[in-house]
Structures are given as structure tokens and as C-alpha cells.
Amino acid sequence: MRKPHLLAFDPADHLVDDAAIAVYLTEALAADDAVHFQDALQAVARARGMAHIAESTGLGRESLYKALKPGAHPRFDTVQRVLGALGVRLTVTPLDHSGQA
């Protein structure tokens, strides 16, 4: 019996507009997991084109790939530059301490 062939899911294939990118990054940031957010940031950068993001940030393509690869620890200014090149920014809101979701 033949096993079904499963395709790998790549979120970059579905990040087609600014609204989808903003929601995806917001949800990734809300997960409170730095690795998850970094993975999401890399997916968005791939969706927009790494060469374009590298040029917009002033980083070399190789440097950008290294900064966003799994296990890397990019500097905060690098993350800010990438977010700016993507046309989004981080915002800060107070935590809800009421116990309600």
C-alpha cells in the first residue's frame, strides 16, 4: 500500500498582503516565545523576498539569513530594521490582569 505524500506547510506561501503579515507577526509575538517569533519573522521576510529586505535594511543578504536562521540571536536593532523593511512596527500595550481572556 502506498503512503500518501504530504507537502510541507510554508507560511510564507500564504503571507500575501500587509494585513496578513501584521496578523501573523502579532500572533507570533503574543505567543511569548522568542523562537516562534523569530521563525515568523523569517517566514515573512521570505514571503517579501530576502534580497528586498536585505537591501531595505542595509544588511547583506548573507547577514540577514544568519540573523534570522533558527538558533540565531539577532540584535534588537536588526529586528527593528527588518520590521521596518516589512512595513510594520512593534507596539506596546498593557497586560490584562483581570483574569479575562
Image: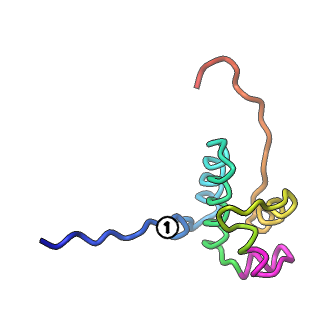
Q: Say how the picture is coloured.
A: rainbow
Q: Residue at x 73, y 63 (%)?
A: 72
Where residue 45 appears, as percent x and y from the top left, is 67, 70
Q: Residue at x 60, y 72 (%)?
A: 47
Left/right placement of residue 43 relative to residue 95 reads: left
Q: Image quadrant for the N terminus?
A: bottom left
Q: Residue at x 65, y 55 (%)?
A: 22
Highlighted magenta segment, given as a residue range = 51-64
Where residue 51 appears, as percent x and y from the top left, is 72, 82
Q: Residue at x 71, y 67 (%)?
A: 68
Left/right placement of residue 19 relative to residue 54 reads: left
Q: Give the main secondary structure, helix, strand or loop, of the magenta stretch.
A: helix
**Up-down: is 6 above or below 97?**
below
Quarter-wise, where is residue 94 in the image? top right
Spot the residue most to the front: 71
Q: Which residue is mark 1?
A: 10
Spot the residue most to the left: 1
Query: Badge 1: how crowded within 10 Å, few (<14), some, or many (20+)?
Result: few
Quarter-wise, where is residue 84 in the image? bottom right
Q: Give the residue type that dot 1 points to.
A: Asp
Quarter-wise, where is residue 54 in the image? bottom right
Where residue 90 appears, as percent x and y from the top left, is 78, 50
**Up-down: is 22 above or below 63?**
above
Q: Please, what secondary structure does the residue beneath circle 1 have? A: loop
Q: Image quadrant for the C terminus?
A: top right
**Up-down: is 80 above or below 91?**
below
